[in-house]
Amino acid sequence: MTYILDTNAISDLMRAAPRIENWMAGLDHGDRVVTCTIVRGEILFGIARLPKGKRRTELEETGRQFLTVVRCEPVPEQAADFYAAVKLVRQQRGLTLDENDLWVAATALALGATLVSRDSAFRGVDGLPLVAIE
């Protein structure tokens, strides 16, 4: 099975949060854990906007290490089809979802991957397999 890590899941890994570490410890040998270009951008932006100092330097190093180890999948062309469909359904239902989250969900759907996140907004995305890390 392929799992795609959302931004908060990578942040949790960077902080060695027990909830994500316990989940990862339970993965099967053949499981793949990846992220995507949108999440990579969010992680890098989050670090870059911090004031210069020890904390930012430490997070830059930790982030670099994780983003080197966790494969970053590109956004496949088919993700645009999922993006349009998910956004339309959510608008029709009066629901919102951050644009980046829409693209992350669409990428997971296009890759046939299960999204790993603590963001409860993903629960409302039809057909999106989700591991809710709580």
Image (spheres, helix red, strand yellow):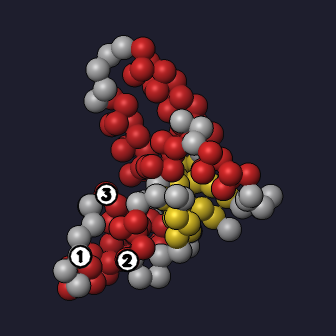
Residue 129 image position (x, y, % from top left): 53, 74
Task: Reply above or below: 126 against 107.
Answer: below
Q: Separation of disc 3 and disc 2 at Cα?
A: 15 Å
Q: Are marks 3 and 2 in contact (CB under 8 Å)?
A: no
Residue 108 shown left or right of residue 95 in the figure: right
Say what secondary structure mark 2 lies in. helix
Mark on residue 124? 2
Residue at 36% over, 44% down: 42
List the residue tagged with mark 3: 100
Q: Are marks 2 and 1 in contact (CB under 8 Å)?
A: yes
- Name the residue type under label 3: Asn
Question: Mark 2 or mark 1: which comes first in sequence?
Answer: 1
Residue 58 image position (x, y, % from top left): 48, 21
List the residue tagged with mark 1: 95
- Name the residue type under label 1: Leu
Residue 52 image position (x, y, % from top left): 32, 16
Q: Separation of disc 2 and disc 1 at Cα?
A: 9 Å
Question: Mark 3 or mark 2: which comes first in sequence?
Answer: 3
Task: Reply above or below: 39 against 48.
Answer: below
Mark on residue 32? none
Q: Separation of disc 3 and disc 1 at Cα?
A: 15 Å
